[in-house]
Image (cartoon, rainbow, N blue to C red):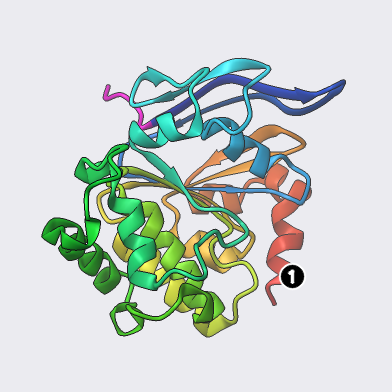
Amino acid sequence: MSTPALELAGLRKSFGRTEIIRGVDLKIAKGERHAVIGPNGAGKSTLFNLITGRFPPTSGTVRLHGHDLTGLAPFEINRMGLSRSFQITNIFPKMTVFENVRCSLLWSHGYRYSFWNMVSRSRDLTEGADRILEQINLTARRDLPAGVLSYAEQRALEIGITIAGGADVIMLDEPTAGMSHSETDYIVDLIRTVTQDKTLVMVEHDMGVVFGLADTISVLVYGEIIASGTPEAVRGDPKVQEAYLGAALEAEH
């Protein structure tokens, strides 16, 4: 059996006496598109923060391609091949769209802590950034300050930044939150394209997006995974219907 891209074993997180994540076990296969859904307050963002090193677990382990991530800083985890976006758009608004993407390429192109290198003269960096801009359909916005982009375009830019370092496990936290139907369609098509042959883990409330993108869905309720399986299996699970999915699907209509 091949090593999972991401594996959570006995993962728990408490803040004081309050236990938020209560023993999560989960395996996500390489190349899988995996959605984590659940009601508000279920612990989804906390789970993301545990995986990416923003929070240390109270107990349990997170493994990336078999390597234990316990104790590693977020930047170290990123350099091992896991990258994430955030619920709140996280870009440099005064820098150009091109400069935002170029910054995210520096480490993977060998630029460490060298302040005398002129990145503007690097053909590899320029070509790499332009390829990503083409992937995320922002070539026409290349030289604009990122802060003037529309909301959907800023989210697309953030996805471009997320994939720029070459990570093979991509985590997206509510990538379509606050979008219109047309903006959502744009972002879903973009996600489908840029995560081709990569492992995708996403938190998302829009059930249309979840069932349109995910190969596997895990349902998190009060810090515990109550079901995990194909979209069809999860949709028909009585526990999921009772705890979350019925109300969520009704809210879509």
Q: Amino acid at mark 1?
A: Ala
In the rendered image, the vertical position of residue 37 relative to residue 186, given as above or below: above
Name the residue carrying label 1: 251
Depth order, front residue of 59/127: 127
Expressed as whole percent of the image width and height from the top left, the position of residue 77 reads 42, 31
Q: Residue furthest right?
A: 17
Q: Residue at x 27, y 46 (%)?
A: 166
In the rendered image, the vertical position of residue 97 relative to residue 161, given as above or below: below
Looking at the image, residue 252 sits to the left or right of residue 97; the answer is right
Q: Residue at x 64, y 34 (%)?
A: 225
Q: Residue at x 53, y 62 (%)?
A: 175
Q: Residue at x 55, y 59 (%)?
A: 90
Q: Main secondary structure of the magenta part?
A: loop
Expressed as whole percent of the image width and height from the top left, the position of residue 104 reads 35, 53
Q: Residues in magenta?
A: 1-5
In the figure, residue 118 lies in which quadrant? bottom left
Depth order, front residue of 97/241: 97
Looking at the image, residue 9 sits to the left or right of residue 128; the answer is right
Residue 89 visible: yes
In the figure, residue 87 lies in which quadrant? bottom right
Looking at the image, residue 188 sits to the left or right of residue 244; the answer is left
In the rendered image, the vertical position of residue 195 relative to residue 190, given as above or below: above
Q: Residue furthest front?
A: 116
Expressed as whole percent of the image width and height from the top left, the position of residue 55 reads 63, 29
Expressed as whole percent of the image width and height from the top left, the position of residue 243 reads 77, 47
Helix, strand or loop status at disc 1 = helix
